[in-house]
Amino acid sequence: MTMQNKLTVQALQWTGSALKVLDQRQLPEKIVYDEYTDALGVTEAIISMRVRGAPAIGIAAAYGVALSVRKYYAESNHWRQKVAADIEMLATSRPTAVNLFWALDQMKSTLAKPLDNPITAVLACAERIHRDDIAANHKMGELGADILADAKGVMTHCNAGALATGGYGTALGVIRSAYQRQRLNVYAGETRPWLQGARLTVWELAQDGIASTLIADSAAAWLMKSGAIDWIVVGADRIAANGDAANKIGTYSLAVLAKQHGVKLMVAAPTSTIDWNIDNGDQIEIEQRNPNELLPACYINEDSLVSAWNPVFDVTPAELISAIVTERGVVLNPAEQGVRGLRHAL
């Protein structure tokens, strides 16, 4: 079986009556799946970062709506109101990942239709969102690999792999596809403060037999200066119409460093990550997480003079991005035209 025909890592599994979520906080030491049977549980899984990555968050939320309909349809004449409340709850789980709102809109559109069996309809929609995401990842993988044809070394940041999507991955999907064509030297930044690169990305690549080298985030500039990498390949949580892209905190730093060292930056994301309603990255809401995620325990008290600033994402301007790769096509040098041309592309 080829790499493209298997799902080595699955962040989400639908059992027929529940959503199983791989608790990514415990990787790589433990592989633990938590099972959820209602929207409240799915919301908590997203907030707590058991599930993470914009496409995976959207897929999980879609299944959360399906679970809500399963729970309320048979037991209440007011099931639509209760499902609508669950959808609003899911929408509050993470503010930056636009795939979340896109998936919820898909589910609301399904519920707005005349339905003989709402449970079957919403589940079919959730499964389609999941299935389409995997197909999109494979398409992006091939398109991105074409661009990396002459690359000898690549670097990625955070985790934009099968763990962050329905399967295969966006940035890691590109790296997987490129690696099948020619051996690449793959580097991964550790990605503080949650260490998604150290805990998730290098582990996930190892599951597919892909060797990788982990570096401290602060070593990236020196690595670029050495000439070891030609491209940085990352995912995105929201892309504005002009091509500005929000991704894990630290991506903007890498883009600035890449400009200095003649390294190119690729953003790989499905078109569901594009927010057509915002003109530029200044309009992207940046999630601020609890300072306690960053602070050592000794500083977490009322009398401490030490606080923490903990933004989860930053925005890379389009002029620092060499290519945006989607399942609908590639935009080279997006600062020149933005991504609006992808809206109606096949």
Image (cartoon, rainbow, N blue to C red):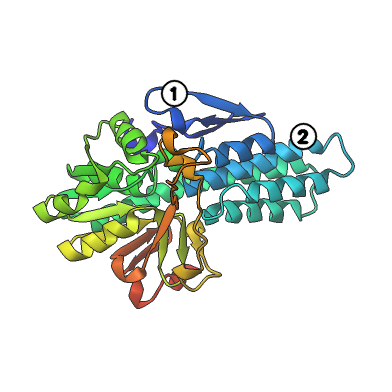
Check the image and name the residue furthest to the bottom.
336
For residue 115, above or below residue 256: above
For residue 199, above or below residue 176: above
Residue under the image location 67 percent in, 50 percent down? 107
* Residue closer to the observer: 261 or 19: 261
314 relative to 275 in the view: left or right: left
Residue 122 screen position, x and y as percent? 69, 44
The residue wearing badge 1 is: 31
Task: Examine the rendering and report whether any part of residue 337 can be seen.
Answer: yes
229 relative to 315 in the view: left or right: left
Residue under the image location 42 percent in, 40 percent down? 295
Question: Badge 2: few (under 14), some or many (20 or more) residues near its Cα, within 10 Å?
Answer: some
174 relative to 112 in the view: left or right: left
Residue under the image location 36 percent in, 39 percent down? 195
The amino acid type, in three-letter code, at marker 1 is Ile
Q: Secondary structure at mark 1?
A: loop
Residue 238 screen position, x and y as percent? 47, 59
Residue 98 screen position, x and y as percent? 54, 56
Instruction: Find residue 35 and report its image quarter.
Output: top right
